[in-house]
Image: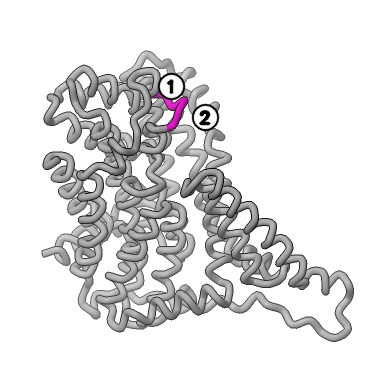
C-alpha cells in the first residue's frame, strides 16, 4: 500500500511540481495578491514591503551556504570519506541502506538541523556508492525525511526561542521553559516514534528494481583527492600554500574557540557553531590550506539555489508578517478552536503558513504572539501550543522545497525527484504529530 501511495505521488510531482525557484516565485505572486485583497495593505505598500524584505535573509542565506560548503568539504577529507564508507558498509542490501540513511539522518537532525541536513545527504551518497542496486532518489529522500525530527530536538528553534529572553511572546506569557516543551512526555513520544518508525516507512517505499530510474553515474562519481604533492623545486609561495603548520595552527585556534564556547554556553548548538566546527575539522583533516580550498571550490557550485531563492522567501515572510496576512490565517484557525482542539488547529495553521514562511524563527515571529494569546484565553497548555507551531513547521517541510535545497545540491537531483516520497512521509508523520498532541 505504501509503495502504491508513493508511486501515485511520485507520478504526480514528476508532472506538476516545478523547480523550487518557480515554486518560490509563484508563492510570491500568491501571497502578494492575497495580501492586497484580504488585508488593508495597498498595492504599492505591498510592493514596498516585498522590496524592503527581499534581502532580509542575507545573513541566514550565507550561513546556509556555508553549512553546505563546509559540510561538503569536511566530508571530502580522507578520514571522513573512510569513516562514512565504513558506516555505510553496515548496510548490505538496498532495504538496509534506506533504513540506515533514514535513521542516521533523524539522529543527526535531533542533534542539530544543519548538521543533519548536510551529513544525511552526504551519507546517502556514500550508501548509494556502496550498494549499486539502491534507489538513489529514495536514499536522498530518506535523508530529507529524517529532517522531520529536528523541531523536537536540541536545535528546535521555536521551543528554544520561547525560552529565550527578548522573544516576541515574553511580554504576553513570559518565558516558556524547555521543561514545558522539549522535555515533555508528548515530545519525547513523538520524536522517538518518528526516529524508530520512519526507517520502516522508507523501507516500505522501495520500488521494484525495474521501476527505479537510472541515475547518471557521474552523480555518484567519487570526488578526486584535493591533496597535492609538491615537486622538489616548489617555490616558497607553493610551500606556504601546502603548509601543514599553517593549517594546524588555524585548526588549533578553531578547536580552542569551540572548547571555550561549549564551556561557556553548554551544548548550545546553533548554525554558527556548527559552521565553525565543520570549518575547523575540515582544515585539520585536509591538512593544508589549499587542499581545503580546493575542496571548498568543488562544493561551492551547489549554493546557487540557496543564493537565488532565499531572497524570495525573505520577501514572502515580510509580506506575511507586515501585511497581517499571517495573523489573519492564524486567527481563522484558532477562532474555531476549543481548549482540546487548539493544539491541532495551531499545528495545521502552522503547516499552512510554513508554505510561505519556511523558517522556525520566522514562524515564531509571525504566529507565536497570536497563538499564545489565544491559548491563554482558552486555557490551553502554552508549552503544547508552542510545540504545535514547531511540529507544523517541521511537518510541512516535506512539501516545501526550501530546506531540501542543501540536500538536493549535494545529491545533484531536482525537487521533483524526491517529493513523491516526502508527501507519503507527510501523510504518515501528520498522524504521529496529531496523536502525540492529543494523547498527552
Magenta highlight: main SS: loop
Report x, y in % for residue 415.
37, 57
- Element at label 2: helix
Left or right? Give the position of 338 relative to 10: left
- Identify the magenta region: 164-169
Q: Residue at x 56, y 53 (%)?
A: 275
Q: Residue at x 28, y 82 (%)?
A: 93
Report x, y in % for residue 386.
29, 33
Left or right? Give the position of 329 relative to 242: left
Left or right? Give the position of 361 relative to 102: right
Report x, y in % for residue 301.
58, 60
Q: Residue at x 31, y 71 (%)?
A: 100
121 versus 60 height, above or below: below
Colour theme: one colour
The reply to whether discs 2 and 1 touch (Cβ–Cβ < 8 Å) is: yes
Q: Quadrant of the N terminus?
A: bottom left
- Element at label 1: helix
Please check the rendered image and state whether residue 286 is part of the magenta-colored stretch, yes or no.
Answer: no
Q: Quadrant of the C terminus?
A: top left
CA neighbours of label 2 inside 10 A, class few (<14), some (14 to 19), many (20+): many
Q: Residue at x 46, y 49 (%)?
A: 267
Front one among 157 and 290: 157
Amino acid at each position: 500500500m505504501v509503495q502504491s501511495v508513493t508511486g501515485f505521488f511520485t507520478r504526480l510531482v514528476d508532472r506538476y511540481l516545478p523547480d523550487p525557484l518557480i515554486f518560490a516565485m509563484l508563492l510570491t505572486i500568491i501571497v502578494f495578491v492575497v495580501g492586497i485583497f484580504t488585508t488593508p495593505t495597498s498595492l504599492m505598500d505591498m510592493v514596498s514591503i516585498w522590496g524592503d524584505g527581499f534581502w532580509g535573509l542575507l545573513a541566514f542565506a550565507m550561513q546556509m551556504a556555508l553549512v553546505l560548503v563546509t559540510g561538503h568539504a569536511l566530508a571530502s577529507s580522507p578520514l571522513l570519506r573512510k569513516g562514512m564508507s565504513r558506516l555505510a558498509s553496515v548496510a548490505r542490501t538496498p532495504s538496509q541502506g534506506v533504513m540506515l540513511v533514514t535513521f542516521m539522518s533523524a539522529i543527526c537532525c535531533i542533534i542539530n538541523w544543519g548538521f543533519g541536513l548536510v551529513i544525511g545527504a552526504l551519507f546517502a551518497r556514500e550508501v548509494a556508492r556502496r550498494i549499486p542496486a539502491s534507489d538513489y532518489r529514495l536514499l536522498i529522500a530518506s535523508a530529507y525525511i529524517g529532517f522531520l525530527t529536528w523541531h523536537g530536538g536540541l536545535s528546535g528553534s521555536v521551543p528554544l526561542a520561547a525560552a529565550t529572553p527578548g522573544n516576541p511572546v515574553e511580554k504576553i506569557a513570559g518565558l516558556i521553559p524547555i521543561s514545558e516543551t522539549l522535555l515533555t512526555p508528548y515530545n519525547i513520544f513523538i520524536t522517538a516514534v518518528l526516529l524508530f518508525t520512519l526507517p520502516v516507512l522508507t523501507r516500505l517505499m522501495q520500488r521494484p528494481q525495474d521501476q527505479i530510474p537510472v541515475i547518471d553515474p557521474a552523480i555518484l562519481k567519487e570526488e578526486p583527492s584535493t591533496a597535492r604533492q609538491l615537486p622538489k623545486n616548489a617555490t616558497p609561495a607553493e610551500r606556504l600554500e601546502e603548509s601543514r603548520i599553517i593549517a594546524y595552527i588555524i585548526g588549533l585556534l578553531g578547536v580552542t574557540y569551540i572548547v571555550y564556547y561549549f564551556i561557556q554556553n553548554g551544548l548550545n548548538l546553533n548554525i554558527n557553531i556548527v559552521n565553525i566546527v565543520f570549518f575547523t575539522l575540515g582544515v585539520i583533516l585536509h591538512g593544508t590550506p589549499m587542499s581545503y580550498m580546493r575542496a571548498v571550490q568543488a562544493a561551492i557550485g551547489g549554493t546557487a539555489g540557496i543564493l537565488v531563492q532565499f531572497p524570495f522567501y525573505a520577501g514572502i515572510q515580510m509580506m506575511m508578517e507586515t501585511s497581517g496576512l499571517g495573523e489573519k490565517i492564524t486567527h481563522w484557525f484558532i477562532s474555531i478552536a476549543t481548549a482540546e482542539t487548539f493544539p491541532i488547529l495551531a499545528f495545521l495553521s502552522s503547516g499552512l503558513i510554513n508554505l510561505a514562511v519556511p523558517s522556525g524563527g520566522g514562524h515564531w515571529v509571525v504566529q507565536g504572539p497570536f497563538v499564545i494569546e489565544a491559548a491563554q484565553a482558552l486555557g490551553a497548555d502554552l508549552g503544547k501550543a508552542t510545540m504545535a507551531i514547531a511540529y507544523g513547521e517541521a511537518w510541512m517541510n516535506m512539501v516545501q522545497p526550501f530546506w531540501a535545497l542543501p540536500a538536493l545540491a549535494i545529491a545533484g537531483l531536482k525537487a521533483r525527484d524526491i517529493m513523491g516520497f516526502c508527501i507519503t512521509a507527510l501523510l504518515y508523520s501528520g498522524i504521529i504529530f496529531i496523536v502525540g498532541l492529543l494523547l498527552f
